[in-house]
Amino acid sequence: MKQVNYRSWAVLCSTIALAFLTHGMRAQSIKGEPIPSISFTDSVYNFGLVAEEKGPVGCIFSFTNTGEAPLVITNATADCGCTSPTYTLEAINPGEQGEVRVSYNPEGRPGSFIKKIRVYSNAGEYPKELVIKGNVTTLGGNERNRYQLQVGELLVSNKHLAFPIVTAQEESTIRLVVNNPSAHPIKVRFLKIPKFVSLNKNEFVLAPNEPEELYLTALVSEKDRPEIRQGILRIEARDERNGQNVRADISLTMPLVNKQLAILGDTAPKMELVTYFDFGEHPKGETIKGTIKIENKGNAPLEIYSIVPYHKAISIKASRKVIEAGQYGELIYKIDMRKVAEQGGKLSQNIDLLVNDPYGPLRKIRFMATIKE
């Protein structure tokens, strides 16, 4: 006796039944017989600013069966695995409502997003298209749920705020969190804000045990040249009991590149260099000197936009700003160990290098050194 695969047979029968159902609906439509119809209240949902570290966000799209026969959602698909739709499984009678729930996972996806969801049904008007969009913000590179700075009794999430790579064509927003863990109000003011960002709140009062999320948005135009922008965000915390003010500075960096980097394709530069250097122990009065070789393995000139060491002990510059395809260049550096000693005797510092390599426009070079006792 031949063995029958009942699962395959069931799938085949379901497929045939769905085909007949679809054909029947179209025939009904032609003959004027009752058919279902799906109408969504809204087809677009804007999440606005989404906090990356808080995890998935969700929304609900409601719909009504505005037809004259039962409506069944047969499937819902999304652009990628970051977007997950679910839907009402039961048949929806005429005049009744159902819903499509959509979840979006922002982890590892800073910046703006637009995702499409396609909804299939027995209404014959498929697929219906839904859209979710928003802007994923980060804590400027900070680890989750940690405060790096204390200003008086005010806790601040970051000592340093770092934008992801910014272009003039896309909005970029990062967040700063402040928290009042005390038993009395604290007045918060920002006395200095870099010109290349906007801040949604400049002055406010935090009640006891009240946190606040602040949003910094990049202000750039297509006329701005590529560079690593640097600035200071000066914050003041005022104790409302005694009027005492405490101030602190938060450093801010923003790597700005041209949007055209993404479409260079085969006619692009490609930079190769060593990015980790452990110099070991050196005497306090010594100056470490050297060079880092850069090779352009691409098919177009490599442009060096900015080099930022972020440490007073390090000076570094490029031997030339443009390296032709197939050619070499150098970064020339000095490390003043006297200044390393003044900063605690140990150097562990990233140096940011911004170039026009679309495969990696922002590179980090790590310098390590310690004072020899």
Image: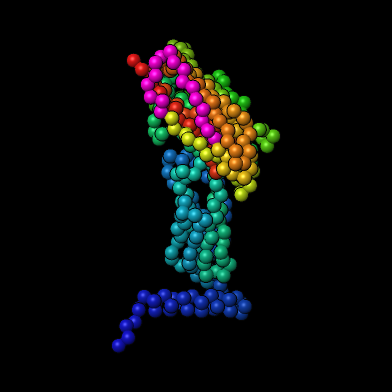
Q: In the displayed structure, would residue 30 be above or below residue 204?
A: below
**Drawn side of residue 327 relative to residue 344, left or right:** right
Q: Nearer the viewer, residue 148 or 270?
A: 270
Q: In the displayed structure, would residue 46 be above or below residue 25?
A: above
Give the colour scheme shown. rainbow
**Drawn side of residue 188 relative to residue 257, left or right:** left
On the image, the x and y values in percent for residue 229 come to 58, 28
Residue farthest toward the right in the current orientation of the protein: 223
Q: Nearer the viewer, residue 158 or 64?
A: 158
Q: Is residue 139 visible?
A: no
On the image, the x and y values in percent for residue 126 come to 56, 66
On the image, the x and y values in percent for residue 368 come to 41, 26
The magenta stretch is 278-294
Residue farthest toward the bottom in the current orientation of the protein: 1
Q: Quadrant of the C terminus?
A: top left
Q: Quadrant of the N terminus?
A: bottom left
Residue farthest toward the left in the current orientation of the protein: 1
Let me know if residue 285 is in the magenta part.
yes
Q: In the displayed structure, would residue 364 be above or below residue 233?
A: below
Q: Is residue 288 visible?
A: yes
Residue lying at 47% horizontally and 56% vertically, measured from the top left? 85
Residue lying at 32% horizontally and 86% vertically, measured from the top left? 2
Residue lying at 48% horizontally and 64% vertically, measured from the top left? 75
Residue lying at 61% horizontally and 79% vertically, measured from the top left? 31
Let me know if residue 213 is in the magenta part.
no
* Secondary structure that dominates the magenta span: strand
Q: Nearer the viewer, residue 198 or 283?
A: 283
Residue farthest toward the front in the current orientation of the protein: 327
On the image, the x and y values in percent for residue 99 come to 48, 58
Q: How many marks?
A: 0
